[in-house]
Image: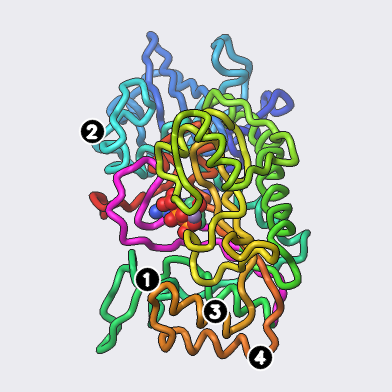
Amino acid sequence: MDLKRTHYIGNLNASLKGQKVIVGGWIEDLRELGKLTFLTLRDVTGVAQIVVVGEQGLKEVKDLNRQSVVRVTGVVQETKARDFPLEIKSEKIEILSRAVHPLPIDPIGRLESNIDNRLNARALDLRNQKTAAIFKIRHHVLQSIRKTLTELGFIEVNTPKIIGSASEGGANLFSLKYFDKQAYLAQSPQLYKEQLTLGLERVFEISSFYRAEKSHTVRHLTEFTSVDIEAGFMDYLDVMQVLETVVANVFEHIEKNCISEQKILGIEVKRPKTPFEKITYTQAIEELGKEGIALSQGDDLQDSHLRKLGEIHPGFYFLMDWPMKLKPFYIHEKEDNSFLSKSFDLQYGYLELSSGGRRLHDPNKIRARLEEQGLNTSQFEDHLKAFDWGMPPHSGWGLGLDRLMSVLTKIDNVREVVLYPRDPERLFP
Ligand code: ATP
Ligand code: MN
């Protein structure tokens, strides 16, 4: 059977009037009106009205369920229908695949299904234009990030996800049997990307990472997509600038390239004002103090504190210069105050989108920090070797792609913007 189509439905236009075309897609609706049958046919680009004339045509489509897949050969003609600019008068309908009813969810979204039912039937859920729009936008986000980082001289890399020892300490690691050995799923590419600055200077990776956390929030998954960069010869302010550019360009790219998707989702994406506000941890503590939340230097910011800060700063802002003791072993201290670190989070209101900073590149300082944090230095000796081979001073960050998507689409739950989300409860489909 020939599967070729001459046109995507979205590419049909008035200049094709009178011309024979072959389109294919999913039947979204089917109405009989006397001797005419009207089909609404959708492919990934758009929707068209198909008119089937006469008894014979009717017989062909009568027992077809919605969401069945057909290929239609016909002639483009003007239409009286308000919802369609054009229609196709069918000459031949070939049934390629029959949908079996009842379907688990209404894929058109006329009947609302709850998120669990939709995720259980995710492939079908993508027939809903709202869901499809999210993932078309996600594709554009990835394209934009790759373009910006490439233009800034970063090289895309792939680091292992199966690792032999805990990269950032033991907590939150999934372990797995690796033949007769014990292995883990990577929580981040941290150690690898740092090592790679030695040979490639500026690297980035976009990949899934894994955290064995029993978090039940709208912003945590056990498998999430992270955008990571690491750059030799850059300090933390430099990589903050890179992050700001990456994020602002994403918004601009979506603003310009995803016009119909924005309409479908009822959102209006705009390039955010730059530069993003920069607030130090110390300032944040003071601001919270004025709001009646008494914190002392060195206290971590809890969810409720971040919510309050998010009320004061509803958009993008950097939260920087965190106390050393709140940061991982590889973070560099501030030269003028060794109690504080060259670190930052990028926030959107209460939501943390990214963490980063300047890294230590002196292996002895790293060993001291590992000990201070009660980590086993011998587990890191493989990694530390590279620091004797000419390790440039470097900085980097990790940006949660799913959280960025959620900010961009104004959809709170990251499960909505991930195709097959994994959380402590969900392992299927
Ligand atoms: P949080 O405090 O929100 O749990 P984190 O500080 O533990 O995040 P980092 O280790 O700093 O996370 O990871 C960098 C970024 O990766 C985060 O800012 C976030 O955007 C994203 N991220 C981390 N963990 C998750 C997760 N479990 N689910 C989704 N995104 C995550
Ligand atoms: Mn963080």
Mark 1 Cβ and ligand 1 under 8 Å apart = no
Amino acid found under the numbered disc labelled 4: Trp
Viewed as shown, does residue 91 lie left or right of 419? right
Q: Are marks 3 and 4 in contact (CB under 8 Å)?
A: no
Element under disc 1:
strand
Mark 2 against mark 1, which lies toward the viewer?
A: 1
- Please give the name of the residue rendered at 68% of the width and 33% of the height, measured from the top-left corner: 255
Disc 4 packing (10 Å; few <14; some 14–19; many ≥20): few
The residue that mark 2 highlights is 101
Residue marked by disc 3:
366
Which of the two labelled residues, at mark 4 and mark 1, occupies the earlier sequence position?
Answer: 1
> Compared with residue 285, is residue 421 higher up or lower down, i.e. above or below?
below
- CA distance for labels 2 and 3: 61 Å
Q: Which residues are magenta?
A: 199-228
Q: Say the numbered circle drawn on residue 185.
A: 1
Where is residue 110 drawn, in percent x and y?
36, 20
Query: Viewer-proximal residue, 303 or 369?
Result: 369
Q: Residues within 10 Å of mark 3 (few under 14, many from 20)?
A: many
N-terminal-most mark, 2 or 1: 2
- Residue 227 is one of the magenta-drawn residues: yes
